[in-house]
């Protein structure tokens, strides 16, 4: 299938493949060249084009009133991407936080659309996506980030704790993908990124609901990649390790965080921006040949 250009910029990375004139090799480069020769023509660095491929696009980020979602929304806006986001609205503090993020985004000179919308309510999700697309004038990226944890040993876990986590982390992402798919399929271009977790890949104590939801989200990512790929829509997941957000600092005991830091080969916890950078890369044309992948962002926690 021939590669399709990005609809809004006309950017086609194939064009950045022109060979360039080479400077004569020196030192280490000369040694490498002597060993391997130069069978593949050198390519022009395409990083600027990768960044340009984001500008002017429209993203929906779920659960962006704080934490990782907020970092993703801000990183998009800093790259010139218009941002629509939702949040749950658990009270005045949650509204205040959402309004604060909307104001931060507006300061970056992009269009912003924010609404309370419970990802567990399919009819609300459908309405949110339609309204966001109408307001923003299109849709290119969907980031399913909204998520919760309700940790407890499985023999003590209540039905409510099980259902709330599965409904938010897994069904919520499904509802958003289903609602966004008609727009992305029709324009034959789009990127979806699901925020899974290292706990969708490995087991741990007290997380049976969370781990089931994130493992399910990884399965959903692969299925959606298969079904939407023929219409040029890439679907990937990121699997963060422990990331310093309010959820983490408030809910996870210090000794578990210490253990996570020790287990990570880089010896640190992640920051929300560590996740945001990878999400933006997956939405850029630099990642046009990646789909159905699960990218750990965990400092080596899973090794
Ligand atoms: P936060 O608790 O900081 O933020 C969660 C966001 O999701 C908030 O905006 C919240 O809105 C929103 N949200 C929660 N439930 C719903 C719902 N039913 N409908 C709509 N919005 C909802 O979470 P994090 O930033 O820590 O986590 C973000 C994602 O990253 C989650 O999917 C999480 O599982 C994943 N993750 C996090 C890790 C970490 O260490 N922090 C590690 C690995 C994965 P409101 O403010 O109104 O409640």
Image (tube, helix red, strand yellow):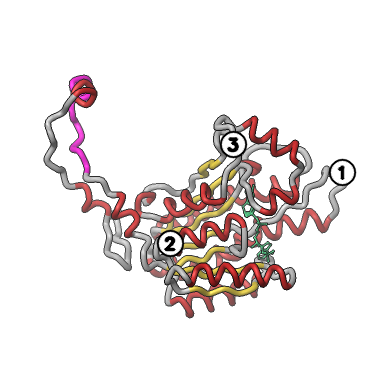
Q: Which residue is the site of mark 1?
A: 155
Q: Is residue 35 magenta?
A: yes
The quadrant holding residue 92 is: bottom right
Quick one: 243 or 195, which is closer to the camera? 243
Instruction: Identify the secondary structure beneath mark 2.
Output: helix
Query: What residue sits 17% from the left and 26% below the top?
Result: 26
Q: Is the distance from the Cβ of mark 1 to the nearest ligand 1 atom less than 8 Å? A: no
Please state, as top left, top right, bottom left or bottom right, where the C terminus lies in the image: top right
Can you name the residue that lies furthest to the right here?
156
SS class of the residue under badge 1? loop
Looking at the image, residue 9 lies above or below residue 270 = below
Query: At which x and y percent is residue 70?
Result: 56, 60
Q: Which region shows up in magenta?
A: 32-43
Q: Position of residue 234 (x, y in %)?
A: 44, 55
Spatial separation of the CA atoms under disc 2 and disc 1: 46 Å
Give the quadrant of residue 118.
bottom right
Asked whether the viewer can see residue 275, the reply is yes
Q: Which mark is residue 214?
A: none
Q: Which numbered disc covers residue 268?
A: 3
How many residues crowd around disc 1 within 10 Å: few (fewer than 14), some, or many (20 or more)? few
When the figure is inspected, residue 257 is found, relative to residue 235, above or below; the finding is: above
Q: Residue at x 49, y 58 (%)?
A: 192
Image vertical order of residue 163 relative to residue 20, above or below: below
295 relative position to 242: left or right: left
Asked whether the beta carbons under mark 3 and mark 1 sit within 8 Å of each other, the answer is: no
Tell whether 287 sits left or right of 91.
Answer: left
The residue indicated by pointer 2 is 78
Q: Closest to the observer: 11 or 110?
A: 110
Q: Is residue 302 visible?
A: no
């Amino acid at each position: 299938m021939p590669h399709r250009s990005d609809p809004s910029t006309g950017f086609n990375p194939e064009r950045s493949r022109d060979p360039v004139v080479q400077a004569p090799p020196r030192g280490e480069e000369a040694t490498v060249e002597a060993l391997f020769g130069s069978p593949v023509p050198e390519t022009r660095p395409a990083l600027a084009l990768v960044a340009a491929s984001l500008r002017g696009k429209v993203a929906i980020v779920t659960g962006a009133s704080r934490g990782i979602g907020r970092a993703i929304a801000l990183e998009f806006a800093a790259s010139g991407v218009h941002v629509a986001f939702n949040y749950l609205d658990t009270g005045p503090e949650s509204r205040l936080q959402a309004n604060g993020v909307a104001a931060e985004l507006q300061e970056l000179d992009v269009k912003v659309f924010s609404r309370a919308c419970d990802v567990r309510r399919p009819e609300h999700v459908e309405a949110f996506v339609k309204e966001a697309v109408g307001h923003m004038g299109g849709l290119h990226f969907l980031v399913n980030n909204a998520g919760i944890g309700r940790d407890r040993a499985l023999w003590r876990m209540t039905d409510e704790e099980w259902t709330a986590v599965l409904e938010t982390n897994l069904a919520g992402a499904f509802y958003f993908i289903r609602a966004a798919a008609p727009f992305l399929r029709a324009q034959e271009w789009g990127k979806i990124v699901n925020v899974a977790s290292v706990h969708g890949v490995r087991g741990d104590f007290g997380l049976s609901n969370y781990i089931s939801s994130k493992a399910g989200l990884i399965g959903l990512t692969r299925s959606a990649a298969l079904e939407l790929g023929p219409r040029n829509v890439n679907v990937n997941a990121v699997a963060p390790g422990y990331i310093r957000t309010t959820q983490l600092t408030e809910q996870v005991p210090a000794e578990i965080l210490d253990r996570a830091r020790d287990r990570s080969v880089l010896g640190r916890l992640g920051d929300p921006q560590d996740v945001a950078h990878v999400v933006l890369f997956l939405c850029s044309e630099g990642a046009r040949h990646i789909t159905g992948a699960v990218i750990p962002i965990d400092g080596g926690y899973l090794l």
